[in-house]
Image (cartoon, helix red, strand yellow):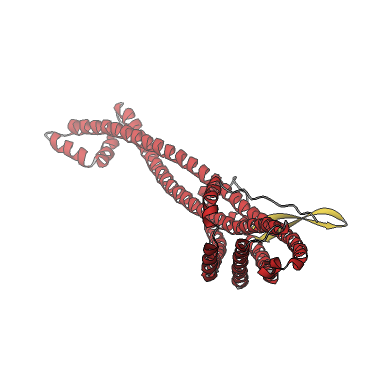
Amino acid sequence: MQTTTSTITLSPAVLEHQAQLKNQLENAELHEHFATALQNVDPTSEVLSLKERIQDIRVGFRDLSISLGHLDNKLNRRKFKFLRHIGSKGLRPRWDFFQEASCVKHGFLHLVMTFRNTLQRFKTLLDQSQLNATDASAFLRQNLHIFTDEHVQDAEKVGALKQEIENFMTIIGSRIDHAGKLRDSLSRLSDDIRLFGREISEKVEYAQQHNESLFNELSEAYYKLQSLEVNLQSVTEELSDISLACFNCLSAGASSAAFFFVKLAPHAARTAVGSILDAVPQGISAARKRAEVTRLRVQIQETRETISDLRKNHTAVNELTQLMQDTNAQVANLAVNIDALSNIWRYIRTDMVELRSLLGTVVGGGHITELFLHKLTITRTVYRKLVVALEEYSRETAAL
């Protein structure tokens, strides 16, 4: 029975260290010492930290949903309508229900579109990983006897052992495929989350561009206000000059008092003068200037209101942009955490491939040395520890 053995690509640094250590560690005493040390290590603390990471992911789903709800509320305001063309629906509903396609064979192949809650999608994958860990730990515990010394030292049992190892390798191959599919599912989930993050990034970029436009409008409005105020000052001074001239013409010895009065109460002075200017030709020019003052004041008030609105919008878009950036950071962090969980299964897959390679050397036969028996003892210990870790993972994730 032939089996296909996958190879593991090790980094140059690992290969270099391995070459340097190979001869140095080919010592029975060192093997015994390492086997003892390995017996004393406890992998459960790392598994508990994995549980915390999973809990962080679940909290991340919830917190992100809340943040997107706040973001949707802001985006629904009229002032942010410029962002609505980027994604016609609310962010939170689309986050809570990712669209996932699955193929179902029922007489013929057809596509079934399902909407599954994003957190439920992760929970489903988590349940799969928990079942996978339970299955793997039970299988490994059942087959730990393969690594005992007596099998390889008893010549009559070697043939049976070889066949048992071949069967073991075949089953491991199916476990590799299962772990790989689970990893791919987790990877797809993190990819979907990153794609969702890109939409938020696009909104951030567009909001920043819009804010630049608001800033330019604000600068133009300030320039317009300054220009209007200069014009108003000029026309007002002309009216004050006309008013003062009228006071001087209509009074005797009151020019200084009139000057003070016109400067102190220009509107009252213009009102008084206006009552008699309509009766003289010069009054036409004064009337036009009074109308100009009224028009300029209206424009100044409108411009000030525009500036106030622009400043509020500029501040609001700044706050919105910050909220979107913070939300996108949550998206990125969630994807990273899911990637980390995904990579755990990639590592388990790699270990299983490595086990196939290791068992292949045993199947190949050859002289069994005392050093090989020590290596086999260490292998057995490693897998006992792996069984403990998988069982702990299964227990901890079952409680989530």
Instruction: Name the quadrant of the N terminus.
Output: bottom right
View extreme (left): residue: 253
Image coordinates of residue 107 in percent, x first then y, are 88, 57
Counting the numbered discs, the total is 0
Residue at the image point whose x is 42% and y is 48% from the top: 315
Task: Judge by depth and name the residue closer to the eye, 384 or 316.
Answer: 384
View extreme (right): residue: 107
Image coordinates of residue 231 in percent, x first then y, are 32, 32
User: Residue 223 falls in which quadrant of the image?
Assistant: top left
User: Residue 158 falls in which quadrant of the image?
Assistant: bottom right
Q: 297 left or right of 260?
A: right
Q: 12 left or right of 266?
A: right
Task: Judge by depth and name the residue closer to the eye, 79 or 67.
Answer: 67
Image coordinates of residue 126 in percent, x first then y, are 64, 64
Task: State whether residue 98 appears in this view.
Answer: no
Task: Judge by depth and name the residue closer to the eye, 371 or 220.
Answer: 371
Image coordinates of residue 123 in percent, x first then y, are 64, 65
User: Residue 304 falls in which quadrant of the image?
Assistant: top left
Task: Judge by depth and name the residue closer to the eye, 61 or 29.
Answer: 29
Instruction: Name the quadrant of the C terminus.
Output: bottom right
Task: State whether residue 213 appears in this view.
Answer: yes
